[in-house]
Amino acid sequence: MRLAFVGCGLLLVGGAAVVTGLLPAADAVGVVERVWPVLLFAVAVTVVAELADRAGVFAAVAERLARLGRGHGWVLWALVVLLAVASTVFLSLDTTAVLLTSVVVLLARHHGYPPLPFALTTVWLANTGSLLLPVSNLTNLLAEHALGFSDPARFAALVWAPALVAVLVPCVVIAIVFRRSIGTRYQPVAADDPHDPVLFWVSAAVVAVLIPFLVSGMPVWIPASVAALVLVVAFAVRDRVAVRLGLVPWELLLFAGGLFLVVEAAHALGLASVLAELTGSGDDPLALLRLAGAGMLGANAIDNLPAYLALEPLADSPARIAALLIGVNAGPLVTPWASLAVLLWHDRLRALGVELPWRRYMLLGVVAAPLTVAAATLALSLTV
């Protein structure tokens, strides 16, 4: 509700900028034309993930991982890492931060582990693991447009090295900090059967078919929308109560839509020339690190999406766009508002009865974020 309130305020400010001429109407129309596919994809993939979760798909995958772990805590945690990365890369960071968090917390409790290291793994990897593909993060979809890429393989070829490093570094931090609690053994527990086998298998099939289409080069809003429609129809037939307006992430739509207009208006006032003093120019390692650092600081100061939008005009080459993505994707690990995924994750933790004071979260993030951003930017500079 608070996010929706902020989003409405941003939309009012953006609308006022258009009405007063501060933001030319043609520029506002250009913003709408650029972002509607991004927001439609976000809505569709959220609907798919929510309904698949209700059908028990994610819980079934997690329980299968527990059996594969054969009682070894380190193996179970490594499998959770792989699941979190796969979920983030193909179904977006919000899916991992919200839906997968619930699954791994229950998985940890079910097998006698404290939930915190598993929950922290999901939220950190939801952010740092979102570099590889355009669908992994809304910032990536915007960057894909700025790069002029139509093939996800070209995007992945640009960022594969920093994407790998951005996964490994936070995992090393978590492994060191929580080594005692992760390194114990557990007794595998039998998984519960899905409450509706038909919906379970339909949902699993839809997710399995959707993933290759998301990396096919087709505009991602098309297969995501088709998948969402199929699942909505299936649930309307067999579980009508699940089909509700609450499936649509209204708060995200209001917040993102307002941000796009406000930041565009700020650029009309000369925001880019002010920020240029902070970010510098060039593609050498220090220049890339400077831009990535600015993205990290901006994300933790105001949120990663407006930070990306504010700094995008200064990312005038593929390497600089990749560096900016490192900062705004892998850097939002410190403040609660650094990314929407973090706020959603913490709300889900509270609903599950898991206590994590923001002070401890921020202290851990102060260690992990700079290390991750610096190492990933170095990897980028060695491969571009």
Image: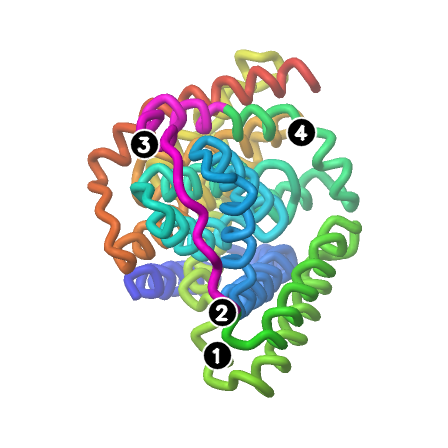
Q: Is residue 134 magenta?
A: no
Q: Earlier in the sequence, mark 4 or mark 3?
A: 4
Query: Which image quadrant is residue 74 in?
Result: top left
Q: Nearer the viewer, residue 80 or 227?
A: 80
Q: Residues within 10 Å of mark 3 (few under 14, many from 20)?
A: some
Amino acid type at circle 4 is: Trp
Q: Secondary structure at mark 2?
A: helix
Q: Is residue 187 magenta?
A: yes
Amino acid type at circle 1 is: Ala
Whether residue 22 is visible to the viewer of this picture, yes or no, is no
Q: Which mark is in front, 4 or 3? A: 3
Q: Is residue 207 left or right of residue 165?
A: right
Q: Which mark is residue 54?
A: 2
Q: Secondary structure at mark 3?
A: helix
Q: Residues within 10 Å of mark 4 (few under 14, many from 20)?
A: some
Q: Earlier in the sequence, mark 3 or mark 2?
A: 2
Percent across and percent down for residue 251 are 40, 64
Q: Earlier in the sequence, mark 1 or mark 3?
A: 3
Q: Earlier in the sequence, mark 2 or mark 1?
A: 2
Q: Which residue is mark 3?
A: 181
Asked if the residues shown at circle 1 and circle 4 are in contact, with their CB atoms under 8 angstroms apart, the answer is no
Q: Which residue is mark 4?
A: 160
Kindly report the distance in space between the C-alpha atoms of the residues bearing marks 1 and 4.
38 Å
Percent across and percent down for residue 70 are 51, 39
Query: Which image quadrant is residue 131 in?
Result: top right
Q: Which mark is in front, 1 or 4? A: 1
- Residues in magenta, as a range: 169-193
Asked if the residues shown at circle 2 and circle 1 are in contact, with their CB atoms under 8 angstroms apart, the answer is yes
Whether residue 201 is visible to the viewer of this picture, yes or no, is yes
